[in-house]
Image (cartoon, rainbow, N blue to C red):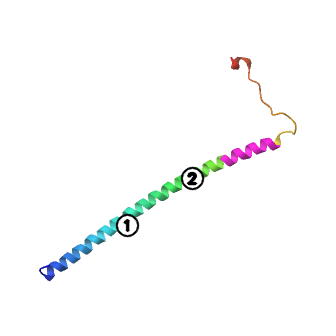
Amino acid sequence: MKSRRNALLWAIGWWLVRRQLRRRAAVAVAGVAAGTAARRGRLRAVLGALVLVGLLAAAFVAWRRLAARPGAPPTVEPLPEDAAA
């Protein structure tokens, strides 16, 4: 730089630009992190619901098998004649 004044102004300008860039980068990273956490939370909720439904279905099947009379064949209702045609 040709003068101290220009050097000082460039240093202050460079400091301000770096500060703004850091702030924008921090906001961008926070936005990405929040979006990832929100997606992860939704995914966990869906997986939790699927696990719950699976557990309920397995419990129902186990209950039906345990509640069945020993030696009795499983009951299957025959189809009506007109439904088969």
- In the rendering, at what x and y percent does residue 44 appear? 56, 54
Q: Residue 64 lies in magenta, yes or no?
A: yes
Where residue 72 sits, quadrant-wise, is top right
- In the rendering, at what x and y percent does residue 75 appear? 80, 32
At x 24% / y 73%, what residue is drawn? 14
What range of the chain is rendered magenta?
Answer: 54-66
Q: Secondary structure at mark 1?
A: helix
At x 65% / y 49%, what residue is drawn? 52
At x 71% / y 17%, what residue is drawn? 82
- Asked whether, in this view, residue 24 is left or right of residue 2, the answer is right
Q: Point out the image quarter for the C terminus.
A: top right
- Asked whether, in this view, residue 33 is left or right of residue 41, the answer is left
- Residue most extreme to the bottom: 4
- Asked whether, in this view, residue 11 is left or right of residue 23, the answer is left
Marks 1/2: CA–CA distance: 28 Å
- In the rendering, at what x and y percent does residue 38 appear? 49, 56
* Residue to which mark 1 is pinned: 26
* Up/down of 79 relative to 4, above or below: above
- Asked whether, in this view, residue 54 is left or right of residue 36, the answer is right
* Residue to which mark 2 is pinned: 45
Classify mark 1: residues with Cα within 10 Å, few (<14), some (14-19) or many (20+): few
Q: Secondary structure at mark 2?
A: helix
Which labelled disc corresponds to residue 67? none
Where residue 76 sits, quadrant-wise, is top right
- In the rendering, at what x and y percent does residue 48 appear? 61, 52
Classify mark 2: residues with Cα within 10 Å, few (<14), some (14-19) or many (20+): few
* Up/down of 75 relative to 83, above or below: below
The amino acid pointed to by label 2 is Ala
The amino acid pointed to by label 1 is Ala
